Image: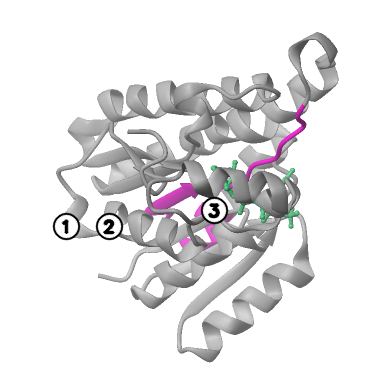
């Protein structure tokens, strides 16, 4: 069945991969990030393969803007059936040197926007008695990582938030799950440099970084009818890094 899916951080990397996959699964996809040009090129890619996509710009660090964006999309599209909270940022630094600003900036995009978007879609999903919420966390949210106190706190928060939503909304036909990627080849990991990534690959049982398409496959399953009895789970897609 054709659903309306909203994907945040769809302009590049994992979010782009998720958006393209959900479109190829037959869903209409609403692409959200701050950068219209990049979103439009993902939209063009989707439409050239016969898919359907809309572009919406929003700065997710602004909670009120997130709430307004969800309301606008719900009104324009008449519903949001599948919500994928994927957008994320890093502001790394050891705890002794981490500023309040860097902590708050990461929490705003990586956790508060997820909460606001989930709250925003809940009512219409409840009314339709069907919904899929898929939040992208990280293995860092499971095991921590030196230099990422802010990021780890936000990503662990996403897991607690999602499990709570699964319990609150399950009786309304809504599932809520987390996908926790390990090292995936995107601009976010490129910033770590070749040496760090080479060392990381050695520690990964599958001996390589993952791809956005491999995360998209997990999201596609959780969004599908086949995933309908899976809720409150954390699906780790990390080549075996944390097992
Ligand atoms: P990326 O390549 O850096 O892309 C981040 C996306 O988030 C972009 O589309 C960006 O769009 C959007 N974004 C950032 N700040 C935003 C804001 N304030 N408002 C709206 N959109 C914003 O990252 P990625 O590697 O694809 O990561 C995607 C998700 O997976 C993140 O949540 C990340 O934490 C998680 N993750 C990634 C890895 C990895 O190895 N790559 C591992 C574990 C978890 P604009 O710049 O166009 O706004």
- In percent of width and height, residue 97 lies at 85, 14
Tell me the residue that label 1 is attached to: 226
Q: Earlier in the sequence, mark 1 or mark 3?
A: 3
> What whole-number distance in Å separates the C-alpha atoms at marks 2 and 1?
7 Å
Instruction: Identify the element where label 2 is drawn.
Output: helix
Q: Earlier in the sequence, mark 2 or mark 1?
A: 2
Q: Earlier in the sequence, mark 2 or mark 3?
A: 3
For residue 193, side relative to residue 225 (left or right)? right
* Image point (24%, 36%), residue name: 231
Instruction: Identify the element where label 1 is drawn.
Output: helix
Position above or below: 46 against 188: below
Quadrant in which residue 31 is drawn = bottom right
Is residue 91 found inside the magenta-colored segment of the image?
A: yes
Which residues fall within the magenta stretch? 73-92
Tell me the residue that label 2 is attached to: 221
Q: Tell whether label 3 touches label 1 (CB within 8 Å).
A: no
Position above or below: 212 against 222: below
Q: Residues within 10 Å of mark 1 (few under 14, many from 20)?
A: few
For residue 227, side relative to residue 203 (left or right)? left
């Amino acid at each position: 069945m054709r659903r309306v899916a909203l994907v945040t951080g769809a302009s590049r990397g994992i979010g782009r991969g998720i958006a393209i996959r959900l479109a190829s699964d037959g869903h209409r996809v609403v692409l959200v990030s701050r950068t219209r040009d990049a979103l439009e090129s993902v939209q063009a890619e989707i439409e050239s393969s016969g898919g359907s996509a809309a572009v919406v710009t929003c700065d997710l660090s602004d909670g009120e803007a997130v709430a307004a964006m969800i309301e606008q999309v719900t009104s324009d599209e008449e519903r949001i059936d599948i919500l994928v909270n994927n957008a994320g940022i890093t502001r790394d630094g050891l705890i002794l040197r981490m500023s309040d600003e860097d902590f708050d900036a990461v929490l705003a995009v990586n956790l508060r926007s997820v909460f606001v978007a989930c709250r925003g879609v809940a009512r219409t999903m409840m009314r339709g008695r069907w919904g899929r919420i898929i939040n992208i966390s990280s293995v860092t949210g499971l095991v921590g990582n030196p230099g990422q106190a802010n990021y780890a706190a936000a990503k662990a928060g996403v897991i607690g938030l999602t499990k709570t939503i699964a319990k609150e909304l399950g009786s309304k036909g809504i599932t809520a799950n987390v996908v926790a990627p390990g090292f995936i080849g995107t601009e976010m990991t490129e910033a770590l440099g070749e040496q760090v990534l080479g060392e990381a690959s050695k520690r990964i049982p599958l001996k390589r970084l993952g791809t956005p398409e491999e995360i998209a496959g997990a999201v596609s399953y959780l969004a599908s009818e086949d995933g309908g009895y899976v809720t409150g789970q954390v699906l780790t897609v990390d080549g075996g890094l944390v097992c």
